[in-house]
Image: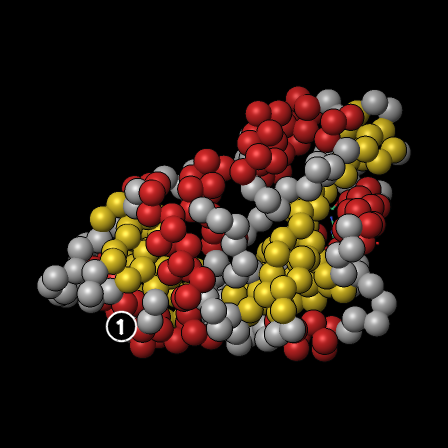
Amino acid sequence: MRIASYDETDHDEVLAMNLQAFGWPITEAAVKRYLKHDERWMDIVGVYAIERGRTIGQVLPLKIRTRTSEGEETVGGIAGVTVVPGNARKGVATTLMEAAHDVLRDNGIRISFLLTTEYLVAYGMYRKLGYFDASSFSSAQKLVKVARKPKDTVLRPYRKKDWRRTDRIYRHGTRRLLGFVVRERAFLNKKIVTSPLTRENIMFVQDDKAEGYVVLAPGEDDVTVREIVCSNGRSFNRIMALVEAGAAEKYVLTYLQTSRLGRRRFERRGYKFNRTTWGRVMVAPLVRGLSNKKLSELYDFGGAFCMMALDTF
Ligand SMILES: CC(C)(COP(=O)(O)OP(=O)(O)OC[C@H]1O[C@@H](n2cnc3c(N)ncnc32)[C@H](O)[C@@H]1OP(=O)(O)O)[C@@H](O)C(=O)NCCC(=O)NCCS
């Protein structure tokens, strides 16, 4: 088995492997788009296992800026871990994970994060490789019965030129949080190019009563709040009151509220959080001398640690 990067693989085989594992259509054009618009992608794309000319496994290491209690730190993000069926349980993914860790270390990175689900066999592999649970993907819901619409505040679809204001609101709204809260300039515009997110999913408000935006995924019987960022608790309540006003007799759902602040604001509005969930954010040190305890101090997992849905990988 040989380790290679995306350039050396058969791109059709890579596409098929990712469609099968994640339903993710990773094509040459998509890779070009990620490299241009998503600063987390590394110049060397992926580590792949090639055996007898066939691509049989993949791990995609990303580099992601984070905030710790001691300042900014670029960490690794491990994405797209998969092997082609028929090649499982031969140590391929473990070898690729170790190769991805080497790539990260070669780039001066000393911490690696990943997202997974506790019921996947991958979870056991990650634990063996030294990862531990940093946070779960907490989710919450509320059935909206009576919905009163606040006066004087109106949400409107996001416009591309709003980016300076949303960037500023984001910086202000996350200033006390740690973790995945260091976003690139014009983040929402770039996300619109690289993901299924549309302008219409982002509702923006800025007036003398509220300032912020909410990313929604409306369903038939529910509305999912994928992200809400606002300047203060008052804005949060006004924006959520407007969201709920448009969801009478429906459930409003939210997930990935990893920070205590995010959870508390929803709880105060009557949202019920599920204590145990399957989704996990995991983390591992990549260098000697960096203990799990130190990682917990750097990120305050369960407290100020934040990862919102638009930052998942
Ligand atoms: C997860 C996955 C990448 C593992 O690939 P792999 O090459 O078979 O993994 P390895 O052979 O290196 O196994 C490493 C460890 O994973 C665990 N593991 C792997 N397959 C397992 C299985 N079928 N049952 C239980 N544990 C398993 C074991 O702890 C194993 O160590 P061991 O063989 O010493 O007991 C592969 O099963 C896969 O592609 N799954 C579908 C996609 C997916 O779920 N990706 C993870 C997204 S977060």
Mark 1 lies on a secondary structure that is: helix
Q: Quadrant of the N terminus?
A: top right
Q: Residue at x 47, y 54 (%)?
A: 309
Q: Residue at x 38, y 51 (%)?
A: 164
Position in image of residue 53 (x %, y %):
83, 22
Position in image of residue 52 (x %, y %):
86, 24
Q: Is 280 drawn above or below residue 60 in the view shown?
A: below
Please state which of residues 231 and 307 is positioned toward the viewer in this rendering: 231
Q: Residue at x 66, y 62 (%)?
A: 73
Q: Is residue 226 visible?
A: no
Query: With 20 as the anchor, is 272 left or right in this view?
Result: left
Position in image of residue 205 (x %, y %):
25, 56
Query: With 212 as the anchor, is 285 left or right in this view?
Result: right
Q: Is residue 59 visible?
A: yes
Q: Which corner quadrant of the image does residue 65 belong to?
A: bottom right
Q: Is 196 drawn above or below residue 28 in the view shown?
A: below
Q: Residue at x 33, y 43 (%)?
A: 161
Ligand 1 within 8 Å of the CB at mark 1: no
Q: Which corner quadrant of the image does residue 2 belong to?
A: top right
* Direction left: furthest residue: 151
Residue identified by numbered label 1: 234
**Which coloring applies here?**
secondary structure
Position in image of residue 138 (x %, y %):
48, 65
How many numbered tags mark residues here?
1
Amino acid beneath label 1: Arg
Mark 1 surroundings: few (<14), some (14-19) or many (≥20) residues within 10 A: few
